[in-house]
Amino acid sequence: MSLRHLMSEVASGDVVTKLKTAEQKWLKLAPHLAESLKPLAAHATKIRETYESFAASQPELLKQIVARVEKDPLCTGVVPTVSAPRDPKLCKYTVEGTLVHEIMNNVKLLERREKTMYDGLEYKLTDKEKKEIIANSAAFLTAQNNKVIASLADSMSAEKMKEIEKEAEEKMAKAIASVKLSDIPDSIPFKDVLRMQ
């Protein structure tokens, strides 16, 4: 489950208890579901585990997000244009109350949260995450190097290509070895983390 989808679970109150309750309901339903629907039950467990993991690794960030959600749960920022909501059953062309309406409301809520609620929040990187960033960057640069070297293969002799490959490997190894964990920032904007998901 991506961090972006996990943020849809953030709400006021004890979220872990709510997720555990939902997980238990799904697990009770699982034996009675068709095979194609059984992964939904497993997904409830995955949501809870991912939320607990995020809460343990980023407690301060989660507190800030929960505080913002509690302050404006619907991320409205919109002033209603009517004094009272109309009854959807009385509207001739309404989709309110349908599954599509509920899904689109949730999608729009997540979009509003991403635009307004996460400004100024920082995601603190662990040493493990910093090492992963260095490893992923090294893998990307190595792949790009290999593409460039492969494009030169037609225009150079095999001996010259071996020299170029050896030189590129040595330079890449030195470059990777020179990067330290302290070169990576301790935190990055939470909005950037969501975009990477």
Image: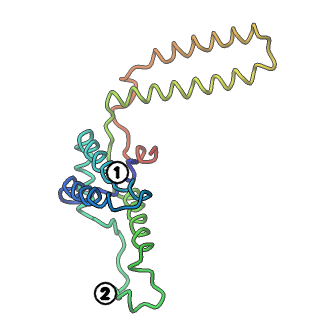
Nearer to us in this view, 97 or 157: 97
Q: Amino acid at mark 2?
A: Ala
Tags 2 and 1 touching, CB below 8 Å: no
Rendered residue at 38%/89% (across/down)? 89
Decide which of tag 2 and tag 1 comes sooner along the chain: 1
Nearer to us in this view, 44 or 107: 44
**Is the C terminus in the top left, top right, bottom left or bottom right quadrant?**
top left
Q: Amino acid at mark 1?
A: Ala
Q: Can you identify the residue that label 2 sits on?
A: 84
Rendered residue at 67%/26% (across/down)? 147
Nearer to us in this view, 70 or 22: 22
Rendered residue at 35%/86% (across/down)? 82
Q: Can you identify the residue that label 1 sits on?
A: 42
* Front position among marks 2 and 1: 1
Residue 128 appears in which quarter of the rendering? top left
Give percent across and percent down for residue 16. 21, 52
Q: CA distance from mark 2 to mark 1?
A: 41 Å
Rendered residue at 29%/43% (across/down)? 54
Nearer to us in this view, 104 or 30: 30
117, above or below 53, in the image? below
Give percent across and percent down for residue 132. 41, 29
Crowdedness near tag 2: few (<14), some (14–19) or many (≥20) residues, C-alpha within 10 Å: few
